[in-house]
Image: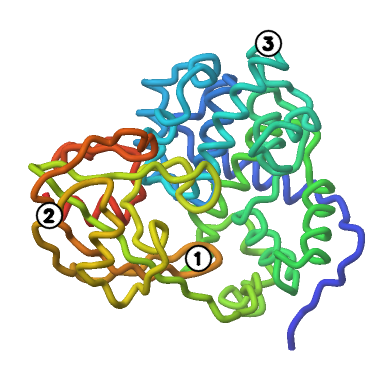
Amino acid sequence: MKKIIELHAAPTDAAFSDSLIAWQKQHGRHQLPWQNTRDAYRIWLSEIMLQQTQVTAVIPYYERFLQRFTNVEALAVAPVEEVMEHWSGLGYYTRARNLHRCAQQVVEQHGGVFPADVQLLLALPGIGRSTAAAIAAFAYGARAAILDGNVKRVFCRVFGIEGFPGEKRVENSLWERAEALLPAQDIESYTQGLMDLGATLCARSRPLCKSCPMQARCVAFASGRTAELPARKPKKAIPEKSTVMLVVLHEGDVLLERRPGHGIWGGLLSLPELSRMQSASSEHVSQDKLEFALADFGEIASFDALPDFSHGFTHYKLQVAPVRVHLLRRFLLAGQTDYQWLPLRGLAQAALPAPVKKLLASLG
């Protein structure tokens, strides 16, 4: 029989916090690049990068980012295009645009110092409730509750909380529990412990329950329901979109377009899309359509279809039909401020979406 926990005001539980703090101090992670510091800039940067991204993927980006943007002032005055270049490949590019805007506001409104108050942090671009609490806790020792995906999973399993954590009613209950469980001291170890427990032991699949400090009190473990809790998001049909991407080449260079600042891949360089340059089917590409689309860029020598690929976004899947076009000669980009030619073999650091960079790398 399922053990269901009613969603009412969460009780305090000092034993949970004490056990977690003791475990974190002995077994938690202590050598990540953004740890062992009170520098709010470094902590903020890591928290933004770690949103929906694994630690192993974040570390090299984090280190390269700090080499170029050593403090919030350096980031604030940098061109957004350069920020996007250093973010390229990390995904969820709205984070990078918000990161840049946030740095500018910290400099303009707070004199280059991140505020210690959670509510003031929440007012900054790209900083949500959990991220604000993490920054305040790690940088200033503030007693504030976090509730990211890892923490939700820990709470749902340990306390046997039913329902999808993204549902408002369930999420509100989880926030109440997060607030109630806050310890009176050692907030940094407690906060890091929640993150570490969810990331290393209480993983979504194959959790390491035998090593978990919460095993004796975990409802999911006791009832054999670690695979069921937390409840998964209800499935719904994922819509699909399609486009034709043009890989326009001339003498070792490729034609790239700067995408609008909003929407998918906003602000990044990408391949021109036939459907964006004119109304066209993604399945039928003719010489006439290509000549019309590329009339301002050059004279076509030949073209051929490359293998189709797909890329998944949060809300839909994009089906891409790439077409390689060789130009006999190219025209000057007079007035074409959103377009530029770059060497095909020199795109490693360019601000390109990961699937586009992978496609072009295969041609280089």
Type of the residue with mark 3:
Gly
Q: Which of 163 and 295 is in front in this view?
A: 295
Q: Nearer the viewer, residue 350 or 202?
A: 350
Please tell me whether mark 1 or mark 2 is closer to you in this view: 2
Measured in 3D between alpha carbons, the distance from the residue under mark 1 to the one under mark 3, in whole angstroms, is 44 Å
How packed is label 2: few (under 14 Cα within 10 Å), some, or many (20 or more)?
many
- The N terminus is located in which quarter? bottom right
Give the labeled residue for mark 2.
326
Please tell me whether mark 3 or mark 2 is closer to you in this view: 2
* Rendering coords of residue 364 (x, y %): 11, 49
Q: Which residue is at a point 65% across and 31% down the rendered structure image? A: 135
Q: In the figure, is residue 63 to the left or right of 20? A: left
* Rendering coords of residue 226 (x, y %): 59, 73
Choose the circle earlier in sequence order: 1 or 2: 1
Type of the residue with mark 1:
Pro
Q: Which residue is at a point 28% across and 66% down the rendered structure image? A: 289
Q: In the figure, is residue 114 to the left or right of 304? A: right
In the image, which disc is placed on residue 111? 3
Q: Is residue 12 above or below residue 36?
A: below
Tag 3 secondary structure:
loop
Residue 326 picture quarter = bottom left
Q: Nearer the viewer, residue 63 or 218?
A: 63
Q: Nearer the viewer, residue 344 or 212?
A: 344
Tag 2 secondary structure:
strand
Give the labeled residue for mark 1.
207
Choose the circle earlier in sequence order: 1 or 3: 3
Choose the circle earlier in sequence order: 3 or 2: 3
